[in-house]
Amino acid sequence: MTKPIYILNGPNLNLLGLRQPEIYGRETLEDVADACAALAEELGLSIRFHQSNHEGQIVDWVHEARLQGAGIVINPAAYTHTSVAILDALNAFEGPVLEVHISNVHKREAFRHHSYVSLRAEGVIAGFGTEGYLLALRRMKTLVTT
Ligand code: DHK
């Protein structure tokens, strides 16, 4: 059995589809989870899809992935711009890490232009809407199989 890809989501993404749809779109996080599950099946990957509003919970999932996961796709949401703790946890993970942002953070406020997670991520996808998760999963397939 191959190890799963962890798809981790940070604060407020539980409100996806409801909050600021002009920025984040109308799809819910459940829609994203379903689309990721369908693509993962097509690609022959297994996934663990999680969301939390709590930094420590995300750190704990990264630690779990360290023992059980093949790769991590992460949208740390606001923690992207603040969390040394998540960066440190990702630095303790040995597999590939891909960073996803639904919106184009570089087109937004200056405080969203810096990402701690980018210091660790193999790649970053921003501004592709929720499709970014699917693009990241396709890239992850390449990274874990080559
Ligand atoms: C989501 C958030 O909640 C913001 O805090 C980030 C990110 C951007 C996104 O585009 O997915 O700045």
Image (spheres, rainbow, N blue to C red):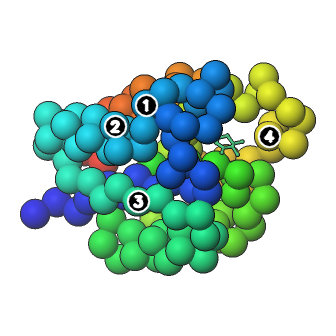
Which residue is the site of mark 2? Answer: 31
Q: Are marks 4 and 3 in contact (CB under 8 Å)?
A: no
Q: Residue at x 26, y 59 (%)?
A: 4
Give the left or right position of residue 86, taking residue 46 as reference: right
Q: Are marks 2 and 1 in contact (CB under 8 Å)?
A: yes
Upstream in sequence: badge 4 or badge 3: 3
Q: Does residue 44 appear in the picture of this structure?
A: yes
Q: Which amino acid lies under the numbered mark 4 shown in the image of this protein? A: Arg
Q: Report the label total.
A: 4
Upstream in sequence: badge 1 or badge 3: 1
Spatial CA distance of label 3 from label 2 is 13 Å
Spatial CA distance of label 2 from label 1 is 6 Å
Q: Residue 86's x, y, as percent? A: 63, 66
Q: Are marks 4 and 2 in contact (CB under 8 Å)?
A: no
Q: Is disc 4 surrounded by few (<14), some (14 to 19) or many (20+) residues within 10 Å? A: some
Classify mark 2 as within 8 Å of ligand 1 or not, answering yes or no: no
Q: Residue at x 74, y 67 (%)?
A: 84
Q: Residue 55's x, y, as percent? A: 63, 70
Spatial CA distance of label 4 from label 1 is 22 Å
Q: Does residue 124 appear in the picture of this structure?
A: no
As helix, strand or loop, the secondary structure at mark 2 comes to: helix
Which residue is the site of mark 1? Answer: 27
User: Which label sits on residue 50?
Assistant: 3
- Residue farthest along the right direction in this orientation: 110
Which residue is the site of mark 4? Answer: 112
